[in-house]
Amino acid sequence: MIPLAWYLIFSAALFCIGLFGALARKNAVAILMGVELMLNAVNVNLIAFWHYYAQMRSTPYVHGLAFTTMVFVVAAAEVAVGLALVISAYRRRQTPVVDELTLLKG
């Protein structure tokens, strides 16, 4: 059996990679990919804690799976809306670089 700490270390590393990707990149699609990595790190944490909690209890609870499903739904909606905004901004300015997208400035 894999210890819980390994899952947490993996999740923390995945979250840090996603955070670095979201903060260091200038391309809008790369920023969205970084945010997706951070959401996947949260999913790894939820599933790991659910698995170890379910092993301690005699009756299996599905709270961890329900939360993970909600995170997947939010991630899918975020990708759909974010990609639509990026495509719309790209069609207007012909650049995916976030620093050059000043559509919302008055």
Image: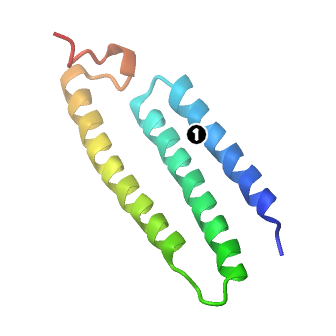
Residue receiving disc 1: 18
Where residue 28 sits: x, y (%)? 40, 31
In front here: 16 or 101? 16
Tell me the kind of residue under disc 1: Gly
Crowding around mark 1 (Cα neighbors within 10 Å: few <14, some 14 to 19, many 20+) is: many
The residue positioned 34% from the left and 48% from the top of the image is 78
Q: Is residue 98 left or right of residue 81?
A: right
| Viewport quadrant of the C terminus | top left
In front here: 7 or 62? 62
| Viewport quadrant of the N terminus | bottom right
Residue lying furthest top: 106
The residue positioned 64% from the left and 38% from the top of the image is 17
The residue positioned 51% from the left and 32% from the top of the image is 22
Q: How is the image coloured?
A: rainbow
Q: Is residue 26 above or below residue 72?
A: above
Name the element at disc 1.
helix
In front here: 91 or 89? 89
For the image, the number of numbered tags is 1
The residue positioned 82% from the left and 66% from the top of the image is 3
Where residue 60 sits: x, y (%)? 58, 86
Where residue 48 sits: x, y (%)? 66, 66
Q: Is residue 67 above or below residue 97?
A: below
Q: Quadrant of residue 24?
A: top right
Where residue 47 sits: x, y (%)? 60, 67
Residue lying furthest bottom: 58
